[in-house]
Image (spheres, rainbow, N blue to C red):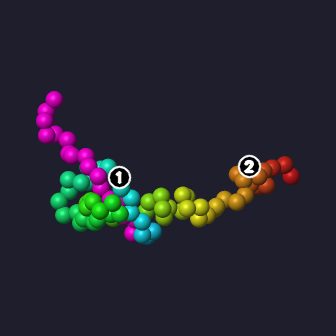
Amino acid sequence: MKSNTHPTYGLVAFRDKSAGTTFLSRSTLSTRVGLPTQALEDGTTYPVFDVDVSAASHPFWTGNARVLDSEGRVEKFRRRYGRR
């Protein structure tokens, strides 16, 4: 195999801007130049990547999802096109 073809895979802190939470994960983003760094609770400094939505702020995962179709599809079809 060729050497030096894949980027390095390291720890990156992802910061959710809308929820204000930070979580640690592995990513190839650690090789990007110009990423800001932040020291987390363990005292280690990691590169930080800001995300708009994560599991901490997504409506599906937080339970704030809206139900757009409260009436079932079958009942709606029967009401429109059912026997009269």
Three-letter amino acid code at the position of disc 1: Ser
For label 1, the crowd category at 10 Å Cα-Cα, with few meaning under 14, some 14 to 19 and many 20 or more, is few
Q: Dot 1 lies on which element?
A: strand
Name the residue: 17% across, 59% down. 33
**Closer to the eye: label 1 or 2:** 1
Three-letter amino acid code at the position of disc 2: Val
Q: Is residue 5 visible?
A: yes
Find out whether residue 12 is within the magenta segment.
yes
Name the residue: 24% across, 66% down. 36
Name the residue: 70% across, 60% down. 70
Per the model, the C-alpha gap separating discs 1 and 2 is 43 Å
Image quarter (top left, top right, bottom left or bottom right) of the N terminus: top left
Write down the quadrant of residue 15 in the picture: bottom left
Q: Which residue is mark 1?
A: 25
Q: Which residue is mark 2?
A: 74
Give the image location of residue 68, x and y in percent.
Answer: 63, 62
- Magenta highlight range: 1-17
In this rendered view, identify the residue nearer to me: 55 or 67.
55
Give the image location of residue 14, x and y in percent.
Answer: 35, 60
Q: Is residue 38 left or right of residue 19?
A: left
Q: Residue furthest front?
A: 42
